[in-house]
Image: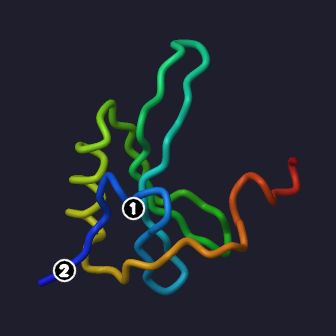
Amino acid sequence: MRTESLNDQNYMEKVYRFEDRQAGVSLIFNPDENIFTYNAYCLETHLMKELFTVEQEFLEDALDLINAEFGSWELVEVSGKSSGCGSCAAK
């Protein structure tokens, strides 16, 4: 049984990993509605291709979903090397 999972204290610093796939929860701002939502996601890290994404209104719902779907994967710290939008070519 897993002793640690993504929770409201660590979801910004940790993700689940399995081979070239990463799953986690991110915070999204919608400027049209002026609200934040939570994105439960899984992506293929080398291709930066989204394989799974579900927006949730509440953090607890996003965490429950991601832990249920990917909780058997290894939980790791997000590395200092960003592979997200801050380092993409479209910047």
Pointer 2 or 1: first along the chain? 2
Percent across and percent down for residue 88 are 81, 57
Determine the residue located farthest toward the left in the rendered image. Answer: 1
Question: Which residue sits at x=68%, y=73%?
Answer: 80
Look at mark 2 in the image and give the residue it sits on: 3
Question: Which residue sits at x=25%, y=63%?
Answer: 67
Determine the residue located farthest toward the front in the rendered image. Answer: 9
Q: Secondary structure at mark 1?
A: loop
- Mark-to-mark CA distance, 2 and 1: 14 Å
Disc 2 marks a residue whose amino acid type is Thr
Q: How is the image coloured?
A: rainbow
Question: Which residue sits at x=32%, y=52%?
Answer: 8
Disc 1 marks a residue whose amino acid type is Asn
Disc 1 crowd, CA 10 A, few/some/many (<14, 14-19, 20+): few
In the rendered image, the vertical position of residue 14 relative to residue 56, given as above or below? below
Q: Dividing the picture into quarters, in which one does residue 29 lie?
A: top right
Percent across and percent down for residue 91 are 87, 47
Disc 2 crowd, CA 10 A, few/some/many (<14, 14-19, 20+): few
Check the picture and name the quadrant holding the N terminus. bottom left
Percent across and percent down for residue 22 are 49, 71
In the rendered image, the vertical position of residue 12 relative to residue 54, given as above or below? below
Q: Secondary structure at mark 2?
A: loop
Look at mark 1 in the image and give the residue it sits on: 10
Label placed on residue 42: none
In the rendered image, the vertical position of residue 89 relative to residue 38, given as above or below? below
